[in-house]
Image (cartoon, grey):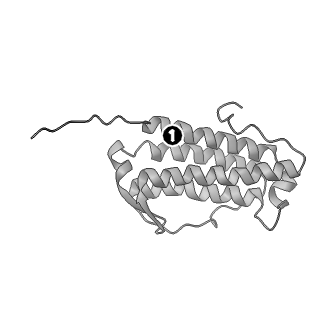
Amino acid sequence: MTTTATETRQFISSVQLLEHWQGHRNLTRRVIEMFPEKELFEFSIGGMRTFAKIAVELLSIAGPGLKGIVEKQVEDFSEETFQPKTKEELLAKWDSETEVINQYFNQISEERFQETFNLFGQYEFPIYQNILYFVDNEVHHRGQGFVYLRALGIDPPFFWERFSI
């Protein structure tokens, strides 16, 4: 009997995944900055939420989700804990949440990325899939922000400019 060993090569490291995600967060932050204050909190199209409410959703998922993963605590999802009144307040929370993400993400061992976790008691997938959900959800909603900005006559940043400010 002959057996053949195959080498499995990792496509992306956890450090690269975090860098990729933070690049997306950087771009979303720039989109928030581009909104005029009033429109950030009041403008919507077709019954969609304002971009401020969308940003609050993103803030309610990323840091709390990672904290739950690291601490192995399944908590319900809630957008009620943070209700900003100004763009400055929203951006400050965005920045502080970036540090929370870095803190908790760096506590996840490479082995744990394959572990199943029931995120918010709703999404029972491997941890790496939950993290990819955080990124995918942000990209989706940032697209809505791009549409809003264009409707307001503002050119959004190029979607590939995730690391330049």
Q: Give how far across and how far down residue 2 sits, in percent.
A: 12, 38
- Extreme residue in the front direction: 1
The disc labelled 1 sits on which kind of residue? Answer: Leu
Q: How busy is the neighbourhood of tag 1: few (under 14 within 10 Å), some, or many (20 plus)?
A: some
Q: Give how far across and how far down residue 37 sits, in percent.
A: 84, 51
- Extreme residue in the top direction: 164
152 sits to left or right of 161: right
Q: Quadrant of the C terminus?
A: top right
| Residue 30 to residue 129: above or below | above
33 sits to left or right of 13: right
Q: Give how far across and how far down residue 16 sits, in percent.
A: 48, 35
* Along the line of sight, the residue nearer the viewer: 106 or 138: 138
* Along the line of sight, the residue nearer the viewer: 115 or 62: 115
Taking the spot 42% from the left edge, 53% from the top edge, the residue there is 127
Q: Can residue 9 be seen in this view?
A: yes
Q: How many marks?
A: 1
Taking the spot 79% from the left edge, 42% from the top edge, the residue there is 156
Question: In which image quadrant can residue 69 be found?
Answer: bottom left
* Along the line of sight, the residue nearer the viewer: 138 or 67: 138
| Residue 58 to residue 5: above or below | below
- Extreme residue in the left direction: 1
Taking the spot 42% from the left edge, 36% from the top edge, the residue there is 11
Q: Quadrant of the N terminus?
A: top left
Q: Is residue 84 visible?
A: no
Taking the spot 28% from the left edge, 34% from the top edge, the residue there is 7
Pointer 1: what residue? 18
At mark 1, the secondary structure is helix
